Image (tube, rainbow, N blue to C red):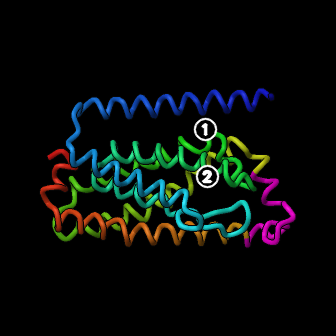
Amino acid sequence: MTWQTIFFIVAGGLLLIALLYIYSRERGRKAKPSAASIAFDAFLVALIMVLAFVPQIGYITIIPGLSFTLVHLPVLLGAYVGGRRKGLFLGTVFGVTSILVAATQPVGLNALFLLPYIAIPPRMIFGYLSGLFFEIGNGIFQGKGKRPFQVVVSFLSSLMHTVLVFAFLFLFSYSDVLSFFASDSVIGSGILISFTALIALGALGEAVLAAVFVPLLGGLLEKATPGFYARIKGE
């Protein structure tokens, strides 16, 4: 084991500890979540697991070893409704399921998500920051300006997820990522521009879906069941 590997493992572990500490502090602000909040969390966790483990539903394989995901949508919905606490919790669940999915398909870039310090921290950061952005914006924007803001946050948060994931991939497994780009696969063999464009288009598609469905579902929940929605938020 090289010193770089040891450094990355230690750094990833410290980051994970820091994020878990943030979550524990946030959780401590409300010791007893409502039954509605627990039920909503359970529903979103179940949805994450269905999307993660049903083939070609939550992870859509483009080429062997590279998949696009819809699993970030329940995380964003939780962040939309419950803010950074739910975003952080659901992001952690997302990260754990990505390890389990990688264990069933350890091919190409997917195999790198077997490493907890690659799979979990970027999803935790994504969930926490998404919830924080929703909280800040909902406190600033009201009325007609609220919905466009939520669309923008959903779109940018989805892109942020992609950026964070690839940042951790390059940070902790730089040589493995480069070797995948230079592999003998149909797209990867010397066609770096096409491969990058494919990733960018996939990220854009994920962001568009988030911008459409997260505000739509969150708004429907708020209007159709205002009492339940308020209890989820702890109001």
Region of the chain picked out in magenta, as a range: 177-194
> To which quarter of the image does residue 26 belong?
top left
- Indicate which label's residue lies in the foreground, 2 or 1: 2
Residue at 27 percent across and 56 percent down: it is 137
For the residues bearing labels 2 and 1, Cβ distance under 8 angstroms = no
Q: Does residue 131 sit above or below 206 in this rendering?
A: above
Q: Nearer the viewer, residue 155 or 26?
A: 26
Q: Does residue 85 sit above or below 59 in this rendering?
A: above
Q: Amino acid at mark 2?
A: Val
Residue 122 visible here: no
Residue 227 magenta-highlighted = no
Q: Left or right: where does residue 59 sit relative to residue 7?
A: left
> To which quarter of the image does residue 1 belong?
top right
Q: Which numbered dot is residue 101? A: 2
Tell me which numbered mark, 2 or 1, is placed earlier along the sequence: 2
> To which quarter of the image does residue 21 belong?
top left
Q: Nearer the viewer, residue 177 or 101?
A: 101
Q: Does residue 148 sit above or below 31 in this rendering?
A: below
Q: Nearer the viewer, residue 21 or 46?
A: 46
Q: Element type at marker 1? A: helix
Residue 163 visible here: yes
Circle 2: is it few (<14), some (14-19), or many (20+) Cα within 10 Å?
many
Residue indicated by mark 1: 117
Q: Which numbered dot is residue 175? A: none
Q: Position of residue 131 (x, y in %)?
A: 35, 50
Residue at 77 percent across and 26 percent down: it is 3
Residue at 17 percent across and 67 percent down: it is 224
Q: What is the distance, in whole Å, between disc 2 and disc 1 at their CAs? A: 15 Å
Q: Position of residue 49 (x, y in %)?
A: 48, 54
Q: Does residue 187 sit above or below 31 in this rendering?
A: below
Q: Amino acid at mark 1?
A: Tyr
